[in-house]
Image (spheres, rainbow, N blue to C red):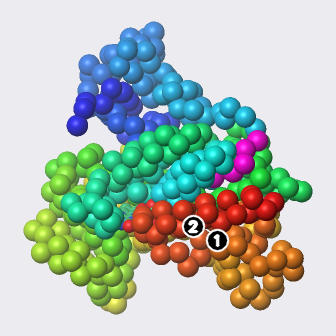
């Protein structure tokens, strides 16, 4: 692995440092983290760069240039991320650059459908933060999640897809023949069709202390943050495939990985269960709930846990915790739009629209296309869609199907 060319100088208690770390992590940009409270030389360097002041985060780049307390826009600009589109109108706008969105985009661009993809973090979505994808057809040895994501991005670029990064879609509207997306910087883009492929995100425990220690001991991505726990004790919360997979990854760094499972068994696949239960560094604690996170100097130090059978509570000293308890759809920006969501917030598409208690108005005019939402011309694919199977290959498959439906829609629209 090449040495990171960016060094982030900060301290564990500093919220702005956490923010910068999160931005770099979300965009999968490698960096060195130096806590200036543990490194006198680093502290002096920060003071020198800031003309006598000890300001953090101070982020130093390969060419010696540096940013002090940057916001996301400044950091994105410095890193050369493209955050503004070249035009305001396209044939198709794809929201989300994960496997579903990028596959759809490369299909449409290849057919000369003018396509813009808007992504808020790193291209590749959840696949990019997966250590290894073992079940991708055509990769007999498996493929690294990051490598797979880079390949997808390159392929989309080869067909001329325009890609925006570090832009959060905040609103979707629809009028006449226009489907519009607004981004957090206030830009508004319109298109003849829109594909929502914004996937899902990690569910939180919602217990005291969880938000307070986010990035300071509480994490949701072992690939991104596992290396910070070399030689330490970590806890993984969850009992499914992700929890098992990520626990195994964490054993590469941590000395001990304790998995807290709510029930009496793991829900992970048989092979993962065997690997986890046989691993000498992993301890599994059954029937265990997390009640609270506590810490010292803004850093997590312990979990309060409870056995949900005996009701016994105890304090578990930890260096870090990784939470893998399922996913929630990224659909907040659709609230207020006419796109119909199921009760969990996933997008309803195609024939499922006919099974809703109240049919959307659009069904009075025609049957929806496969993967079309309750708003004609707005489609959905991948993890964000209700009843999707939440896999890389099926998300990519839905992306390609959506692209073919969109081609048909645009031909007749
Ligand atoms: C830890 C882990 C391990 C996994 N392992 C495997 C595996 O081994 N094999 C397998 O097949 N699957 C695996 N999966 C599941 C797989 O990664 C997902 O099913 C797949 O990535 C879903 O693709 P998607 O494109 O639908 O959504 P995502 O991958 O979630 O991509 C959605 C994209 O949309 C972006 N986005 C969200 N909201 C907005 C917004 N408002 N504005 C702009 N952009 C936005 C996100 O940043 C993201 O990049 C794993 C998932 C995780 C979390």
Q: What element does badge 2 sit on?
A: helix
Counting from the top left corner in percent of width and height, residue 90 is at: 72, 44
> Is there a contact, CB below 8 Å, between mark 2 and mark 1?
yes
Q: Marks 2 and 1, how far apart in space?
A: 8 Å
Which residue was labeled with disc 2? 401
**Above or below for 390 versus 150:** below
Q: What element does badge 1 sit on?
A: loop
Image quarter hosting the C terminus? bottom right
Q: Which residue is drawn at 61% across and 60% down?
A: 403
Image quarter hosting the N terminus? top left
Counting from the top left corner in percent of width and height, residue 30 is at: 35, 36
Local crowd at mark 1 within 10 Å, few (<14), some, or many (≥20)?
many
Q: Which residue is drawn at 45% across and 29% down?
A: 57
Asked if residue 400 can be seen in this view, the reply is yes
Local crowd at mark 2 within 10 Å, few (<14), some, or many (≥20)?
some
Counting from the top left corner in percent of width and height, residue 321 is at: 33, 60
**Above or below for 345 versus 199:** below
Q: Nearer the viewer, residue 16 or 221?
A: 221
- For the record, the magenta segment spans 89-94
Which residue was labeled with disc 1? 371
Left or right: 111, with 146 as reference point: right
């Amino acid at each position: 692995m090449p040495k990171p060319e960016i060094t982030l100088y900060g301290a564990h208690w500093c919220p702005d440092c956490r923010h910068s770390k999160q931005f770099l992590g979300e965009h999968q940009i490698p960096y060195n983290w130096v806590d200036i409270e543990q490194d006198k030389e680093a502290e002096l360097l920060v003071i020198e760069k800031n003309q006598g002041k000890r300001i953090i985060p101070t982020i130093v780049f390969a060419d010696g240039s540096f940013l002090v307390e940057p916001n996301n826009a400044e950091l994105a600009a410095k890193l050369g991320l493209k955050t503004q589109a070249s035009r305001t109108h396209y044939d198709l706008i794809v929201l989300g650059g994960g496997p579903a969105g990028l596959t759809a985009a490369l299909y449409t661009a290849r057919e000369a459908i003018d396509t813009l993809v808007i992504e808020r973090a790193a291209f590749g979505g959840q696949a990019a933060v997966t250590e290894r994808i073992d079940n991708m057809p055509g990769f007999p040895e498996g493929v690294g999640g990051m490598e797979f994501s880079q390949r997808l991005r390159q392929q989309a670029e080869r067909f001329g897809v325009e890609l925006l990064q570090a832009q959060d879609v905040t609103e979707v509207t629809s009028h006449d023949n226009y489907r519009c997306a607004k981004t957090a910087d206030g830009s508004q883009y319109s298109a003849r069709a829109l594909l929502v492929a914004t996937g899902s995100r990690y569910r939180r425990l919602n217990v005291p202390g969880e938000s307070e220690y986010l990035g300071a001991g509480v994490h949701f991505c072992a690939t991104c943050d596992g290396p910070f726990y070399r030689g330490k004790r970590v806890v993984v919360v969850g009992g499914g495939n992700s929890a098992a997979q990520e626990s195994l990854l964490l054993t590469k760094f941590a000395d001990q990985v304790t998995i807290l499972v709510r029930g009496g068994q793991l829900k992970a696949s048989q092979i993962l269960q065997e690997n986890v239960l046989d691993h000498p560094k992993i301890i599994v604690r059954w029937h265990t709930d997390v009640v609270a996170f506590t810490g010292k100097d803004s850093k997590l130090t312990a979990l309060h846990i409870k056995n949900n059978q005996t009701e016994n509570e105890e304090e578990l000293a930890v260096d870090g915790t990784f939470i893998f308890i399922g996913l929630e759809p990224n659909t907040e920006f659709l609230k207020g739009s006419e796109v119909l969501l199921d009760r969990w917030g996933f997008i309803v598409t195609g024939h499922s629209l006919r099974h809703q208690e109240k049919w959307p108005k659009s069904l009075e005019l025609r049957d929806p296309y496969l993967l079309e939402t309750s708003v004609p011309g707005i489609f959905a694919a991948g993890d964000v869609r209700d009843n999707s199977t939440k896999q890389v290959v099926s998300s990519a498959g839905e992306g390609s199907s959506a692209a073919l439906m969109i081609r048909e829609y645009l031909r007749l629209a």
